[in-house]
Image (spheres, grey):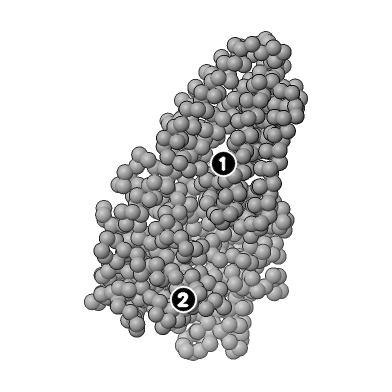
Amino acid sequence: MAFGGSGSRTASVVGVTCALVTGVVVYVLWGQHGPLGVSERGSLISVALLPPALVVSVVGLRRQRSGAREDEAVAVARLVREVRSVGEPQWMHSLGGELTAIDVTFAFRPYAHARAAELPPTPAGQLERVVEDYRAVRPRRLVITGEPGAGKTVLARKLLMELNKARGEREPVAVLIALADWDTREALTDWIVRHLERDFGMPSRSARKVMDARMVLPVLDGLDEMDAADVDLADSRARRALEALARYQDGTDPAPLVLTCRARRYDELEADGSHILDAARIEIEPVDSARAVRFLELRGAARRPALWEPVLDELRSATGGVLASALSTPWRLALAAIVYEREGDPGELVGTAASSADAVAELLLGRFIAAVVDRVPRQAGRFPERTVHARLHRLARGLETDLVLHRLGDRVAPAVRTAVIGGLVLTTAVQVAALWQWPVYAEVAMVNCLSLILGVLILFNELRSLQTGSTEESVLSTIAVPPLGSPLWRLGLRRFGRRKVRVLAVFLLVSAGTWWNLADGPFDARTVLLLASTGWIALMIVVGCVMAEFDSTAVGPGGPVRAVWCLSALAAGMVAGGIAISGGPELIDVLFGACLITVLLGLMSEWVGYLIYRLANPALGLRLPSFLDWCVTAGLLRTSGIAYQFRHREFQEWLVRHPRPLH
């Protein structure tokens, strides 16, 4: 469930909640309570403090997401910072930890069946000068094609980084987005805005502002990855995507964009009449034998030159041979260098090449994980090859491109909906039973009615989402927590001290007065429990405010999972504190727990799916985010915003075909 509504509606909710909480506190402290004792008062105060804490957290998150105060220039500057903060790590991950890419070359290829853009008069056709060629294209619409592993994504990332480095004040910000998760029934601009929010932590209104102003240059990666191989062109998402991109305008002019696709797939789409008008198409050329030899001499053969000599001799002598063809892409060359960097005999590639180029690829991919595991430093942790292979195989099945942790629940979607709706029905039933079956005080009845209304509203929203097929992400999927010991914690605490420490100060002042009226003495057990509960709630406020300061793109894909576990632990501690204060579970504690579960189910439905998926797949281990971060460090995966991606689509497809190591 995602929170929505206008600013006036939010203000009304805040006002009503504060008035209600004030009334509860006044009634508890100074009203005529009959037999109501200190434990009941403590429980009521705990419940009364829950709504403002939730309102402060949610409204704070919504204010952060809404970007209501950001004008266009500030929003664009924010996007530039976010894109640059993830650009360098993504560049290194795409190259497997290297800093320099193979200097691939490309040639402009004329369209056969469509109106093309004006091409550069003297194209450079080199990776290092791709920005020059792109700036000379009119209009600035570019399609990058090539064979699998040719370096399309690397070329697109290079173009993105160089464009943003030399960006003028009124030039759009280049943003890389994978096409695989685009449901073409969603408007292109809406989909891009959603990615600006998800991948770069942009507030929703800021993202909409920069998109409406056409200050985003979408670099769309992987048109060929939108459909399975057996999908007809007429029914393909790729065809519908090209039709939408052809209509993408900036006023009366074609809007700039960059698109990558495998050459064969784009040829098929073009022949079928699907294309982008007024675009230039470049095709990445194979890496010739001379450049392949230079790369291997610097990267692989430098350590063990004698073992590499047969491979280099074969590449020099048979420039059009099977081995030269098999190693004609940057991906395959990097793969060969990694596989034989420390172990094994690269000379076996020459014998395998006598069979076919596909056999060379199978040999390299079959040894890839073992080579990576062997070269990871021991202090960085190490997983056995079979464990790595089994877990990645399980994750690769049914995956398109992006691996977003809270979207793993989509694989068990019916079970997720059943669990969420069942939990909401159960908590609502508890509240109804408390309302009609048990004799309660007026305060308890008031709290129960509030939580019952909340439960019914969230249940209604879930049923409506089930009927409409909505996949809107919740507020909690946009926050992230870095690992313990990360320098981001110090940064978040400093920002909290500058911006939001007054929230904690007000809470402590109100709590001090409240506990002074409730406590029986300065050192009795109840006073200690009350002070402990106050400290716990203060900790919740600090952690919640600090989490709102974190940049999800800087934290990384594992951050949202840590945030949910952190919030769940704090909520569980709050419930336990309420029970301890009241001296044992009472009716008010049951209602308090039911209310809290209802709120969490409404806020965390996709995380329920994540938990179900994890329980259904125990082989993935207890610390899946840590494992995936290790795979990124090792070079098996890469990151894009809050998503993980396999190092290369060929590697992912190979894992799907091979559930176990080949040796």
> Quick one: quadrant of the C terminus?
bottom right
* Residue positioned 53% across, 82% down in the render: 326
Residue type at mark 2: give it: Arg
Q: Is residue 39 above or below residue 77?
A: above
Q: Residue at x 64, y 21 (%)?
A: 443
- 650 lies left or right of 435: left
Of circles 2 and 1, which is in front? 2
Residue tagged 2 = 262
Q: What distance separates the C-alpha of mark 2 from that of mark 1?
A: 42 Å
Q: Is residue 86 above or below residue 112?
A: above
| Side of 172 relative to 650 (left or right) | left
Location of residue 387 by image quarter: bottom right
Q: Nearer the viewer, residue 169 or 65?
A: 65
x and y percentages locating residue 486 in the rendered image: 54, 43
- What residue did someone put label 1 on? 485
Q: Is residue 118 visible?
A: yes
Q: Earlier in the sequence, mark 2 or mark 1?
A: 2
Secondary element at image label 1: loop
Which residue is painted at 45% across and 55% down in the image? Answer: 195
